[in-house]
Amino acid sequence: MPRKKSETDAALPAETPAAPARRGRKPGSKNRNAKPKPPKKPGRKAAPKKAHTPAPELYFQLGGREYNCTALMEQARAAYRATHKTGIHTCKVYIKPEEGAVYYVINKEEGKFPLE
């Protein structure tokens, strides 16, 4: 029920003095712990993107035959993946044309396949 004004209410001051304003951030403000960002330097641009360079292909010729080293490396990885389910961390390939074989060491596991 609304209250009626009386003569005693009129004698009281309309408002009591408010507490002094507090220093610091305002209530409800965002970024409470955010530091001011330094201004950007004029004229500074991002580095241009480099063009994708294809992987080099390495060939060697011996005894009238030509061998693609990149293809032999992929064959060694495929032979390793056929027998092991773990990822490849290290890979070394040794080509011995006098024996007609390619030896590989992948993750400390040795293997061999014929050189074609």
Image: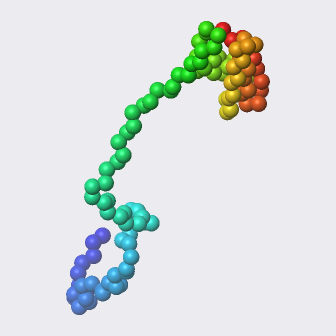
Say which quadrant the N terminus sits in.
Answer: bottom left
Taking the spot 63% from the left edge, 17% from the top edge, the residue there is 72
**Vertical side of 25 occupied by 92: above or below:** above
Quadrant position of residue 112: top right
Where is residue 76? Give x, y as percent.
67, 19
Say which quadrant the C terminus sits in.
Answer: top right
Give the tally of numbered discs: 0
Quadrant position of residue 107: top right
Q: Is residue 109 left or right of residue 75?
A: right
Where is residue 75? Give x, y as percent.
64, 17
Where is residue 92? Give x, y as percent.
69, 28
Instruction: Residue 65: tell me if it is visible.
Output: yes
**Vertical side of 99 occupied by 49: above or below:** below
**Vertical side of 67 occupied by 89: above or below:** below
Taking the spot 58% from the left edge, 21% from the top edge, the residue there is 70
Front in this rendered view, residue 38 or 46 = 46
Q: Is residue 76 left or right of residue 26?
A: right
Taking the spot 23% from the left edge, 81% from the top edge, the residue there is 5
